[in-house]
Image (cartoon, grey):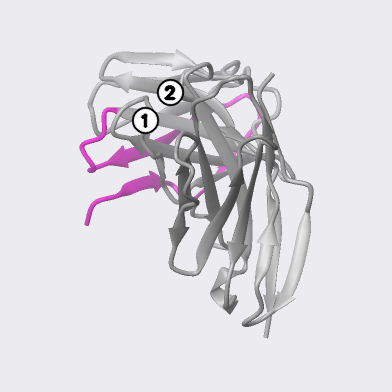
Amino acid sequence: AQTVTQSQPEMSVQEAETVTLSCTYDTSESNYYLFWYKQPPSRQMILVIRQEAYKQQNATENRFSVNFQKAAKSFSLKISDSQLGDTAMYFCAFMTMDSNYQLIWGAGTKLIIKP
Amino acid sequence: DGGITQSPKYLFRKEGQNVTLSCEQNLNHDAMYWYRQDPGQGLRLIYYSQIVNDFQKGDIAEGYSVSREKKESFPLTVTSAQKNPTAFYLCASSIAVSTDTQYFGPGTRLTVL
């Protein structure tokens, strides 16, 4: 079975600090797509970053970057210079051809940024 | 403004009633999805549609039904057969059912009284 594990149910850091959220996944496929979504208190699910497994270069989007370790099946999200607006649930997800391109989701990490 | 809208934001249902949740998109996407979100869990797929007049069951389709008569619209009916319908429901769309990114609506909170 294809699964996603987010081992940190909740984290909190001070504003302006850097925080890393962990995600591991399990699949036997070699080509797949990984995502981090953010769900703030409004509950709107927002795409943060996307990574194609065939690309060795780690994806970045402004203050958000990933550390993609394919052999270890790890896909962590780093948030630099954290801001109060980063407070949200963060979900890791991936899709493969084997899953018929359906997203498989982790249970989420609640991130709290303290002033 | 392009995007996905869901209505209503909050919905209350008495046991034994069917209710329909609306999802509309003006992104010209072919694919649409319905997910259910429960506390402490990841999203679970209920139904998805690749194209008009076609839809497929997801992991937890029992007690739900959908239709796709128009490209823009993908309503979800929660029937009385759904044993535990209280949850947050999210609709999403993508260009196609492929590696395209899925974009989400704001969600509907359904509570059974």
Asked if the residues shown at circle 1 and circle 2 are in contact, with their CB atoms under 8 angstroms apart, the answer is yes
Residue hosting label 1: B32
Task: Check the residue under mark 2 and report the chain it is in.
Answer: B
In the rendered image, residue A89, in percent from the top left (x then y), is placed at 64, 57
The answer to whether A38 appears left or right of B3 in the picture is right
The answer to whether A44 appears left or right of B110 in the picture is left
Q: Quadrant of the C terminus of chain A?
A: bottom right
Circle number at residue B41: none
In the rendered structure, which segment of residues is drawn in magenta? B1-30
Q: Is B97 drawn above or below residue A85 in the view shown?
A: above
Q: Residue at x 44, y 28 (%)?
A: B76
Residue B108 visible to an observer of this rendering:
yes
Q: Does mark 2 fall on the same chain as mark 1?
A: yes
- Under mark 2, the amino acid is Tyr
Q: Residue at x 23, y 26 (%)?
A: B70
- Under mark 1, the amino acid is Met
Q: Secondary structure at mark 1?
A: strand
Residue hosting label 2: B48
Q: Residue at x 29, y 32 (%)?
A: B73
In the rendered image, residue B71, in percent from the top left (x then y), is placed at 23, 28
> Neighbour class for label 1 at 10 Å: few (<14), some, many (≥20)?
many
The answer to whether B58 appears left or right of A22 in the picture is left
